[in-house]
Amino acid sequence: MAGLGTVDRIEPPRIDDSVSLAAEALVRKRRRDRIVAWLQLLPGSAFFFAFFLLPLLGLLAMSFFSLVDFEPVVDFTISNYAEVLTSSVHARLALRTVQAATIVTAIVLLVSFPFAYTLNFVFRRHRQLLFFLVLVSLFGGYIVRIYAWRSILGNQGVINQGLMAFGIVDEPVRELLNSMYAVGASLVNFLVPLGVLPIYAAMQNVSPGIAEAARDLGASRFRTARQIVLPLSMRGVRAAAAFVFIATLGEWVTPRLLGGTEDLLIGNRIEYYFGASLDWPAGAALAITLVVAMGLAAFAIMSLMKRLAR
Amino acid sequence: MTAVTGSPPSPGGWRRGLAKLRRRPIASSGFVGVVLIYLFAPLIVMVAFSFNSSPRLSFPFSGLSLRWYEEIFTDTLVLRAFRRSVQAAVVTAGITGVLGLLAALGILKIAKRARGFILAISAAPLAVPGLLFSIGLAIMYRQIGFERSIWAATLGHALIALPFVFLVVGASLERFRFTLLEAARDLGASRWHAFRTITLPLILPAVMGAMLLAAAISIDDFVIAFFTAGQDKTLPLIMYGRVLKGIDPTLNAIGTVMLLLTTSLAFMAARRTTIGER
């Protein structure tokens, strides 16, 4: 504003050519900017194409290959799908996997939502620090965490030692490790941060004033969370549910290391096809089936939760 | 907590007392505490046992010692894996830093509709489970005849880390004041000169943070390396192999070293990218 006084000292430009010249220069600059922008996007996009889309297409193609002498051969057969879809083992594993994913998702949401809520509305002053801890735990130690549960749940583990020291049991409880409980405890453990993240992010759009007003008008904390904050942060809850559900469906390391020999998930079967059995086409077909099922599941969760939010 | 429900308007003192009570939610502290303990307990136990002098995973400690660290730092298998993990992390950070920064700069200047499309597509790897992506990658490598190696795994790491870098750098560029850049250009600075002296210094903390995050993702990865690294075993692969073989006290020490690497990288990354945002 201070510079306005100097304007009248500048000679008024002749409108006809200088303006059109300036406009032309601007248009040229815009066009050049846009070309530069696409050039800047090019390397990343090429990388994305080569190392993400091509592998997924390769997976799709492989599912139609046939297996000759343990070597995948280019082919177009649906026998792999017939094989994986009719196997009773797969039906049982798929059922267990969906069951596990549903339970894990429910538990993670039941922990993550109140946690994000408490962070955002109760401990508002320390929420940065607390969120920070969650963020750090999200990127710290996938295999390390799975392993660490062995030292907690094992026969010589912390829990069994404690139980025996207090005389609650005489023998270590063997069911703690190598069971679905161990798998569940570990899965929930590293998926909670993944659940908190989107819910907490969505809550940033809920004004603390709204929650406070509800509280001042006499609503309990639970009612405020359920009727005011939950509908407003539903997007985050849905994203968290989909993330966690999909992550559990594709999980195989946790059941391999913490589950018993029986308690395996469908992911272990895919790993088996690519590892021990060397039947890549069948593994690919099973994986593609899983992707399709996952898409349907994610869609179902989304619409179910949309209905629940109403 | 429910005492407030339906309470009549009351004189100041009483009401303030109630409000104070509300502000000291014991149940909330307890809940947050329990969740945090649950999140960190396995890690704390593992770190503690890594200093236990007895090979048994049991309390009470028979004594403190560094023998497991000594063992792993003289174990050439572990050392080689450690070097490979670090190499993969550094290369991943480098690739994603360059590609992510370029793409984040580019997406600002293109039409809105294309921008939305690219943003949505770029997040797709986050929704695909590591297992499916890894076997797809293994299939592609096999079809083009690219040997399984640490490089094969590293390229996979770069791919899954790229969306994070792209989104984090993009978020920081959104807060960047482009008028500064325009002023420099109007004063005669070249595109490159303006970028190097104005844009880069201002967004460098976010780019560095994002690259640290990419390094943490690379070091933490197990699944991609499992399917694509072949004989070039990284630290998580060594851990997996030893866990399958049975109880091995060196695992606590290896796990602690890995945990230190990933969490300190994630910690530094989070500090650079989240703190100071508000």
Image (spheres, coloured by chain):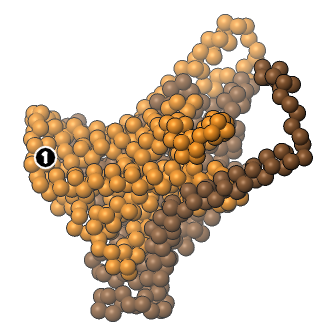
Residue A34 horizontal/vertical position (percent): 66, 56
Q: Is residue A199 visible?
A: no
Name the side, left or right, on which A229 lies relative to A102.
right
Quadrant of the image occupied by residue B46:
top left
Q: Nearer the viewer, residue A45 or A13?
A: A13
Determine whether the residue tagged by mark 1 lies in a helix, strand or loop: helix
Residue at 14% from the left image edge and 57% from the top image edge: B77
Name the side, left or right, on which A254 lies relative to B73.
right
Name the side, left or right, on which A252 lies relative to B5.
left
Name the side, left or right, on which B50 lies relative to B119.
left
Q: Which residue is mark 1?
A: B73
Residue A234 horizontal/vertical position (percent): 65, 48
> Which chain's colour is orange?
B
Residue at 66% from the left image edge and 30% from the top image edge: A208
Q: Is residue B20 visible?
A: yes
The count of marks equals 1
Residue at 60% from the left image edge and 21% from the top image edge: B22
Quadrant of the image occupied by residue B259:
top left
Residue A107 horizontal/vertical position (percent): 49, 50
Q: Nearer the viewer, residue B191 or A302?
A: B191
Q: Nearer the viewer, residue A198 or A6?
A: A6
**Figure check: B52 above or below A89:** above
**Chain ID of residue with mark 1:** B
Query: What is the display colour for chain A?
Result: brown
**Figure check: B19 above or below A304:** above
Residue A211 horizontal/vertical position (percent): 68, 31
| Amino acid at pointer 1 | Phe
**Figure check: A297 above or below A81:** above
- Quarter holding the N terminus of chain A? top right
Quadrant of the image occupied by residue A19:
top right
Residue at 70% from the left image edge and 51% from the top image edge: A29
Q: Nearer the viewer, residue B15 or A50?
A: A50
